Image: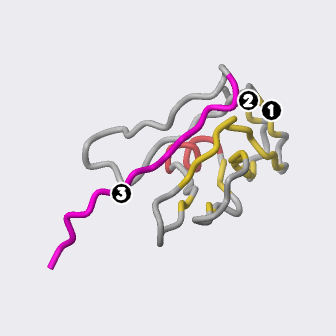
Amino acid sequence: MASSATHTLKVQRLSPDATIPTKGSLAAAGYDLYASADMLIAAGGRAVVPTDLIIAVPPSTYGRVAPRSGLAVKHGINTGAGVIDEDYRGPVGVVLFNHSQEDFQGE
């Protein structure tokens, strides 16, 4: 039997540059996160991209930062460690790897 419980994602902005996560559609699997600052990831390099957000996931769950297929296919960008534990209350940063031979300018 399916559960009808509602789970609430609690989000706190740490700066005016932070963007609250959004869903691309009603049926989207998750929320889109946004960088709070422009960044350059060198070819073959990696960076921790700030979101300036604290995200509290519902009890007995965890958050997962997953790669975006468009970034992977078009630019060779993929995510690294991406688990947000239930009890983590620090700022969320996204580890991005640039697997291409060109620098990537993100916004």
Residue located farthest toward the left when viewing the structure as drawn: 1
**Residue in front for this viewpoint, 57 or 37:** 57
Q: Quadrant of residue 4?
A: bottom left
Residue pictured at 78% horizontal, 38% vertical? 102
Identify the colour scheme used.
Answer: secondary structure
Q: Quadrant of the C terminus?
A: top right
Residue 63, compared with residue 46, is above or below; it is below
Judged left or right of residue 29, residue 99 is right
What secondary structure is marked by label 3? loop
Q: Which residue is mark 1?
A: 40
Label 1 – label 2 distance at C-alpha? 5 Å
Alpha carbon separation for disc pair 3 and 2: 35 Å
Q: Magenta region: which residues?
A: 1-15
List the residue tagged with mark 2. Answer: 105
**Residue type, numbered disc 1:** Leu
Tag 1, which secondary structure?
A: strand
Quarter-of-image position of residue 11: top right
Magenta stretch containing residue 13, yes or no?
A: yes
User: Callout 3 environment at 10 Å: few (<14), some (14 to 19), or many (20+)?
Assistant: few
**Label 1 close to label 2 by CB (< 8 Å):** yes
Closer to the N terminus: mark 3 or mark 2?
3
Return the mark for residue 7: 3
| Image side of residue 28 versus residue 36, left or right | left
Residues tagged 3 and 1 counted as in contact (Cβ below 8 A): no
Quarter of the N terminus within the rendering:
bottom left
Q: Position of residue 72 (x, y in %)?
A: 58, 50
Tell me, yes or no, whether the highlighted magenta stretch contains residue 103.
no
Q: Describe the element under mark 2 as helix, strand or loop.
A: strand
Whichever of callouts 3 and 1 sits on the residue coming sooner in the sequence is 3
